[in-house]
Image: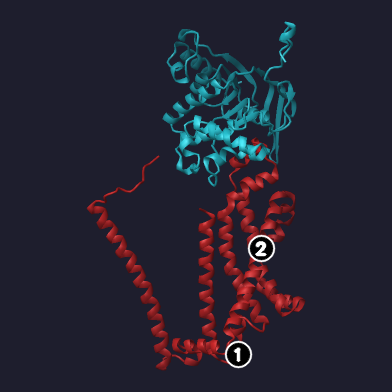
Chain colours: A cyan, B red
Amino acid sequence: MTGDTTGRPLAVPPKIEFRNVELHYFSTKGETHAVSDMNFTVNKGEFISIVGQSGCGKSTLLSLLCGLMQTTSGQVLIDGKPVKGPSPQVGFMLQHDSLFEWRTILENALLGPEIRGMDMPAARARAERILTNYGLGQFLHHRPTQLSGGMRQRAALGRTMCMEPDILLLDEPFSALDFQTRMSISEEIGEIIRREGKTAILVTHDIPEAIAMADRVIVLSPRPGRLKNIHEITFPSLGEVRPGCMAVRDAEEFKDYFHTIWTEMESDG
Amino acid sequence: MADTTPNATPSVAYQNWAARQGRARRKVIVGRLLLLLGFLALWEYAPRNGMVNPMLTSYPSAVWDGFWDLIAQGKLGLHIGVTLMEVMISFAIAMILGTVIAICLWLSPMLERVLDPFLVVLNALPKIALVPIFYIWLGPTGSIYAVAIAVALFITILMLYTGFNQSDPNKIKLAKTLGAGQVQILTKVILPGNVHTFMATLKANVGLSLVGVIVGEFQASKAGLGYLIVYGSQIFRMDMVMAAIVILSLISVGIYLVVQKAEALLTR
């Protein structure tokens, strides 16, 4: 698709594109303007964080991308094609791990392939490999209730990854965890996503987490959610290769990013 | 994860605690036995000594004789069998029909909104009031099944539908992100997540079906424990009535144990 044979790069559409997206919610109480004039693109392999006050429509953006909701006007595009509904290409990690307590960890990971009617023996082998990679090899046949919060979140990631998505949507997936688990699991999951070259969008209200995990941080205004600013996150003081999420928290630049984004979120409009 | 494995060598304090637990358990059992024996003794003593009229209350040894009398006539098995079969069949029909209707209501919110007030009224209506109508429409046998099914059906629909509706919205959202449609949400999330609702409905319904069958037999029947109770009271054989009631309570205990076993198997 990149046109290397001709030596001329063809225009490759961005992995994800929001084009003039508007969203209005309707309910018996009336109409809510949730998202307004949303325009941005995400490149393949990029990690984006979206921050904003609660109710600014950040989770709504993920629902639009996943195809759970349709825009009122404008388009959401993946690989240049409009999103029509949920697709195996997009994996969604929700705030709650929502593991089914009546299934074992392995059976939970196989939920997606079952629903999509995939080749089950292959999916089973894949799920076993993925869960083992995430340190859950001994717990394949355990019930979710027998696992700790961090292990459950890793199992949920395994369930998402079993569909082999190339886009990952993370909707505050760490917010239900205690602080210590949250730090280590976000480092771990950030590492896995980067290693596997997935394109990821993280929605969070935790500014340090947003900075630590992302290549770019998008700041949204309060409702209706508008794009306020986009920050490129780089750490020149830490050298060429970006270290893990934990290490960047000590960098010089980290404080500055935090301060800038904090101020932006505090100021209205 | 908290380690809750018991220590291999229990301490003295634990042994004392365990011994206290054991004593408490034995006290409960002895208490129950004393209550039962006391009741039977009083029931035997009071009528025999003219404190109450034995014609009205009968007494355990007479009930025992009445029980053997029924067996000697060779009819007891028939009566028990008839009642049990009526309970099983109407219970199964109410359960299956109720589950199917609850699923339809869940699949079609519009249908649910239309039917909601009618279901509420039908559930609140004392179904026993319908016995004479069922008798006229369906005859003696049909009316027994109709009452028993009507008593259990509406509560089944309402309990299951409420359970379906209270399923975890996060699990439903998750299934949607994985591409599940309505039917898959039903089979992967709603039904497996409601095994406990199903068991609770099952427990309520066994009792209700039994009530429906006995009431149906009161109206008109040629056999069954309900028939035995009505017949016995008409010819003033209280021993026969009491024997039938004792058998009924044994049947309820038996069914309860079966349901409990089924629950243990299903919710492992």
Marking on residue B234: 1
Three-letter amino acid code at the position of disc 1? Gln
Depth order, front residue of A260/B20: B20
Q: Where is residue A123 in the image (x, y as percent from the top left)?
A: 61, 35
Marking on residue B154: 2
Specify whether A106 is left or right of A36.
left
* Mark pair 2, 1: CA separation: 33 Å
Chain label for disc 2: B
Chain label for disc 1: B
Say above or below: B112 vs A220: below
Depth order, front residue of A264/B61: B61
In the rendered image, which quarter contains the C terminus of chain A? top right
Specify whether A229 is left or right of B33.
right
Q: Position of residue A178 (x, y in %)?
A: 44, 33
In the rendered image, which quarter contains the N terminus of chain A? top right
Q: Earlier in the sequence, mark 2 or mark 1?
A: 2
Q: Are the residues tagged 2 and 1 within 8 Å (C-beta)? A: no
Say above or below: B112 vs A227: below
Q: Position of residue B251 (x, y in %)?
A: 53, 74
State the SS at label 1: helix
